[in-house]
Amino acid sequence: MKEEVSVYEDTVVLDAGDGAMYAGSRSENQVYEKHMNLSITKMIGGGDYLTKREIHVVYTREDDNITFTSQVKDLKRRIKVAERADADYFISIHMNSSKYNDGASGFEIYTDNRNKDIAALVKKIESSLTSLNYTKNRGIKNTRESGQLYVIDNNPVPSMLIDAGFISDPNDFTYLNSRKGQKEVSEAIGFGLLQHLEDKNNKS
Ligand SMILES: [Zn+2]
């Protein structure tokens, strides 16, 4: 008989990229990345896929009011949050940016693939974002090859950073700044995470 698995003992840190005076990149019509990051991040944590299961969600920020004196100190603080929570995964949400309307678009996911578990989770999220078909898939980038990302490389918790699309691209921006787009993207990320945890629990 197959046992019903309803309780997970997983803790996920959701990191809304940027914030406060570090606003991140900006759309052509002056929408800051930090607001889009926060909105999507909270939708992931508050979405059905996570709330209906016993997944413990910890945020690194839940609003735009952070006090920190340098960006590196703030990144260190975010990593501390993950460390203190003894989290299983750290998922950071950001937007990419290029010159306005230069044709650059798509989502990409950064990770250091430090173990099979995080690599498998990244793949699940990649495939679920791809199936939304809202933009192109730029692939999974290894931070050891593609340049360093502080919150991944200095994080004791297995981590990834999702650049959900280009804020500088009109199509990516319009979708990712819309309620519908943010809901779909957050659900795709939540779905990928849940699928991965179910696979993991079935194997163990
Ligand atoms: Zn950012």
Image: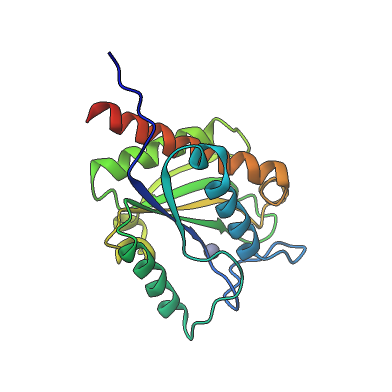
Residue 149 in sight: no
| Ligand 1 image-quadrant field | bottom right
Task: Tell me the quarter of the picture where residue 3 sits.
Answer: top left
Of the 4 image quadrants, the one containing the C terminus is top left
How far from the left and from the top, in percent, is residue 89? 35, 51
Q: Is residue 111 toward the left or the right of residue 63 in the image?
A: left
Of the 4 image quadrants, the one containing the N terminus is top left
Task: Tell me the quarter of the picture where residue 28 sits.
Answer: bottom right
Identify the residue at the far top of this view. Answer: 1
Front residue of 166/193: it is 193
Front residue of 92/150: it is 92
The residue under the point 63% across, 55% down is 39
How far from the left and from the top, in percent, is residue 32? 67, 66
How far from the left and from the top, in percent, is residue 181? 67, 43
Q: Is residue 57 toward the left or the right of residue 10 in the image?
A: right
Task: Say above or below: 149 vs 20.
Answer: above
Colour mode?
rainbow
Residue 142 in sight: yes
Task: Say above or below: 194 vs 176.
Answer: above
The residue under the point 66% across, 47% down is 172
How far from the left and from the top, in percent, is residue 76? 37, 74
Identify the residue at the far bottom of this view. Answer: 69
Task: Say above or below: 50 vs 127.
Answer: below
The residue under the point 77% across, 63% down is 29
Front residue of 154/90: it is 90
Front residue of 46/73: it is 46
